Image (cartoon, rainbow, N blue to C red):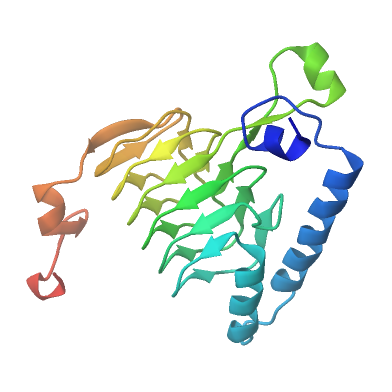
Amino acid sequence: MTIQEKMHSGALYLPMDEALFQEQLDWLDRLWDFNATRPSQLAERETLLRELFAEIGEGCYIEPPLHANWGGRHVHFGRNIYANFNLTLVDDTHIYVGDNTMFGPNVVVATAGHPLLPELREQGFQYNAPVHIGRNCWIGAGAILLPGVTVGDNAVIGAGSIVTKDVPASVLAVGNPCRVLREIGEHDRAYYFKDRRIDGSAL
């Protein structure tokens, strides 16, 4: 098994392989170019993201700075995705995000982990597990998604939550560790924030 195959299979591997590290540096140089753009350089940003990401749909907006272990090389974004400041994508393997999903500031999506056994960590071993985020999700500010988790369509992850296990579709999930608080339902069709009612013309 090649080191690239190990990266994407969940196997243990040593990420400081010389050739692998040089490839990673090349992508990080390109990410640096994206983060160095001026706010008015929207066309340049879009071009750079199309070069960096494995896939990115129309209408996506990512507010710099963006941080990504592989510069976005293993990131698959659908359409109309919005990410606020300081999105961190630990994209040592694949991250999949569905259409119309939003990220608050300072969100971390991590695919990389290290063994609990200290002798293996001492040698620098790593493993990776892909993360899947459904369509039309809202990932609140400061949330952390750990390797291998799946977040279902239309789910909301509360600010500051740490997602250690899969989250089903159409729920509000919060906390550390993140747990389902309730389903998104009829109450949410009437109120958008506390006691503030939704104007029917918005639907």
The x and y percentages for residue 134 are 37, 49
Residue at 83% across, 26% down: 124
The x and y percentages for residue 9 are 62, 32
Residue 123 vs residue 12: left or right?
Answer: right
Residue at 80% across, 36% down: 15
**Nearer to us in this view, 189 or 27:** 27
Residue at 24% across, 44% down: 170
The x and y percentages for residue 146 are 54, 34
Q: Is residue 171 visible?
A: yes
The x and y percentages for residue 82 are 46, 65
Q: Is residue 141 visible?
A: no
Specify the quadrant that holds the C terminus.
bottom left
Above or below: residue 35 compared with residue 20: below
Above or below: residue 163 compared with residue 18: above
Q: Quadrant of residue 181?
A: top left
Residue 89 vs residue 99: left or right?
Answer: right
Q: Quadrant of residue 12?
A: top right
Above or below: residue 34 compared with residue 186: below
